Image: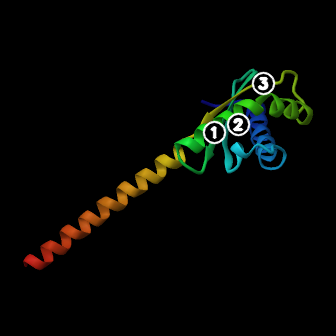
Amino acid sequence: MMRHPRVQRVQQELKEEVSKILAYELKDPRIEMVTVTAVELTDDLRFAKIYYSVMGDQKRREKAQQGLESATGFIRKLIGERIRLRFLPEIVFKYDNSIEYAQHISEVLEKIKKQQKGGKDADKKSN
């Protein structure tokens, strides 16, 4: 789907600003090591899904989600001060598992590669 250039530009601005806010302005320890991976805006710029990843286990992800939810109003207020928009978008934080998924795929491929190599070694020994 082709997005309007303005929507793409605002998405990029939102991603940069929220990343800065998380890195430098929020003092909540639950939000440490959180990275904004993408922002998805509706065409009318009224709703924003902000995708994030976090290093750590399930418990760490849950704490990060709680921290982000509690800071949403503050983050939204700062965005309103920094990005000129007619309407300030409603923000929802969504966990992005694509990094974990890619890591899982990489591990599976590595396991397959080792199994194939092991099979070839067995074939060489039997000849």
Q: Residue furthest left?
A: 127
Q: Quadrant of the N terminus?
A: top right
Quadrant of the rendered structure where residue 51 is?
top right
Q: Residues within 10 Å of mark 3 (few under 14, many from 20)?
A: some
Q: Nearer the viewer, residue 57 or 23?
A: 57
**In the depicted structure, whether residue 88 falls above or below residue 121:** above
CA distance for labels 1 and 3: 24 Å
State the image coordinates of residue 82 (x, y, percent, origin top left). Answer: 90, 36
| Residue drawn at the location 24% of the way across and 65% of the way down | 116
| Residue drawn at the location 70% of the way across and 49% of the way down | 32
The amino acid beneath tag 3 is Pro
Q: Which mark is residue 67?
A: 2
The amino acid beneath tag 1 is Lys
Q: Is residue 90 left or right of residue 55?
A: right
Q: Are the residues flagged by discs 2 and 1 in contact, CB closer than 8 Å?
A: yes
Q: Secondary structure at mark 2?
A: helix
The amino acid beneath tag 2 is Gly
**Circle 3 residue:** 89
| Residue drawn at the location 67% of the way across and 46% of the way down | 34
Q: Nearer the viewer, mark 2 or mark 3?
A: 2
